[in-house]
């Protein structure tokens, strides 16, 4: 395909496109132009976004409702607010089959004298799988940054209504005019990924609930209703002290989905206390080594791990919050 000579459908201005470009934004009037011939226009949906001012308000509202940030509000300064549309492939997959697995469970019996004895038994289960899975995954291959997967999590919870790209009203688009990132995975690749992901999700589910999968006979049909979703993502960069932090917002409702935040003195003290506790636990394990080597090794390992984790957190100087962990409010 010749990528020279593309012009805006609205104003006729020249467009800059590449082989990966599906939608090109006119640098003059801001109109989104459908470029790629590998994807039908009716399969491109866009989720309308709030504007920059609304995102700035959402940021300051978040500061007011965050215990740590509210205390340092006077020292916070917004450096920049950037927004773009990130492409995600969406489709529905029917998954079906049978899984046989083993799970170790504790079984207790009480004798006639009232004494209870427990022991571990292996129980075998067989479950059928028959469900429709709606999958959403990034259409870009680059290393995922903070907020990419978190946007998917929030989308799955809020389920905003999308519009076909070319049905977006002129005034509505002109109000936002966000850049649309290139789609690096075509529809064929997306279908293959959805097929594999659907089976992997089922496998991971049974791995989490069992001690061993004995037979895994699960299949996935061809994905249906595959379409490209353009999700608005805003990032607010702010300064505190000599460092820059950022918060990622879902553009359709202004919800914070991921963030890096400065660590205050209280939290740093918590992590340092955890480091000290870890050292004490490891020392206790070392003292018990002569009497119970296996127990001592476990205790020493646990104490060392706690000390290492909390020590690293204290040195980072920032903390990461994500909606999936139920922290972002």
Image (spheres, helix red, strand yellow):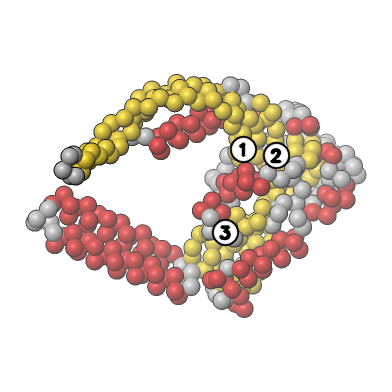
Label 2: which residue? Answer: 229
Mark 2 nearby-residue class (10 Å; few <14, some 14–19, many ≥20):
many
Q: Is residue 247 left or right of residue 17?
A: left
Image quarter of the N terminus = top right
Q: Nearer the viewer, residue 14 or 60?
A: 60
- Relative to 142, is 224 above or below? above
Which residue is drawn at the image coordinates 65% and 39% (left, top)? 88
Which residue of the protein is positioned furthest toward the left in this rendering? 290
The image shows residue 140 at horizontal and vertical percentages of 61, 40
Closer to the chain start, of discs 3 and 2, is 2
Label 3: which residue? Answer: 328
| Residue 184 appearing in the image | no
- Report how far apart the C-alphas of labels 3 and 2 lie in the structure: 24 Å
Closer to the chain start, of discs 1 and 2, is 1
Which residue of the protein is positioned furthest toward the front in this rendering? 112
Asked if the residue at tag 2 contacts the one at tag 1, i.e. Cβ–Cβ closer than 8 Å, the answer is: yes
| Residue 250 appearing in the image | yes
Which residue of the protein is positioned furthest toward the bottom in this rendering? 74
Which quadrant holds residue 278? bottom left
Image quarter of the C terminus = bottom right
Which residue is drawn at the image coordinates 17% and 39% (left, top)? 112
- Relative to 298, is 113 above or below? above
């Amino acid at each position: 395909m010749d990528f020279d000579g593309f012009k805006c459908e609205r104003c006729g201005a020249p467009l800059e496109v590449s082989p990966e470009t599906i939608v090109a934004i006119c640098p003059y009037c801001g109109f989104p132009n459908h470029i790629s011939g590998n994807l039908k226009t009716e399969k491109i949906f866009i989720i309308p976004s709030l504007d920059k001012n609304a995102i700035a308000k959402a940021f300051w509202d978040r500061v007011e409702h965050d215990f740590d940030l509210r205390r340092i509000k006077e020292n916070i300064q917004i450096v920049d607010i950037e927004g773009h549309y990130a492409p995600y492939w969406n489709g529905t997959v029917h998954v079906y089959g049978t899984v046989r697995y083993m799970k170790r469970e504790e079984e207790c019996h009480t004798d006639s004298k009232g004494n209870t004895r427990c022991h571990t038994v292996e129980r075998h289960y067989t479950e059928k799988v028959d469900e429709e899975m709606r999958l959403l995954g990034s259409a870009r291959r680059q290393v995922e940054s903070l907020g990419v997967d978190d946007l998917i999590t929030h989308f799955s919870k809020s389920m905003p209504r999308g519009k076909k790209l070319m049905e977006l009203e002129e005034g509505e688009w002109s109000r936002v005019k966000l850049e649309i990132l290139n789609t690096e995975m075509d529809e064929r690749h997306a279908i293959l990924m959805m097929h594999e992901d659907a089976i992997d999700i089922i496998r991971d589910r049974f791995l989490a609930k069992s001690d061993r999968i004995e037979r895994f006979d699960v299949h996935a049909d061809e994905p249906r209703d595959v379409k490209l979703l353009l999700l608005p993502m805003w990032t607010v960069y702010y300064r505190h002290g000599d460092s820059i932090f950022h918060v990622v917002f879902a553009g359709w409702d202004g919800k914070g989905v991921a963030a890096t935040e400065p660590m205050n003195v209280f939290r740093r003290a918590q992590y340092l206390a955890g480091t000290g506790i870890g050292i004490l636990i490891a020392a206790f394990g070392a003292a018990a080594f002569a009497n119970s080597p296996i127990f001592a090794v476990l205790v020493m390992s646990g104490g060392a791990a706690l000390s290492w984790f909390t020590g690293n957190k204290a040195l980072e100087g920032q903390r990461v919050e994500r909606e999936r962990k139920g922290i972002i409010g």
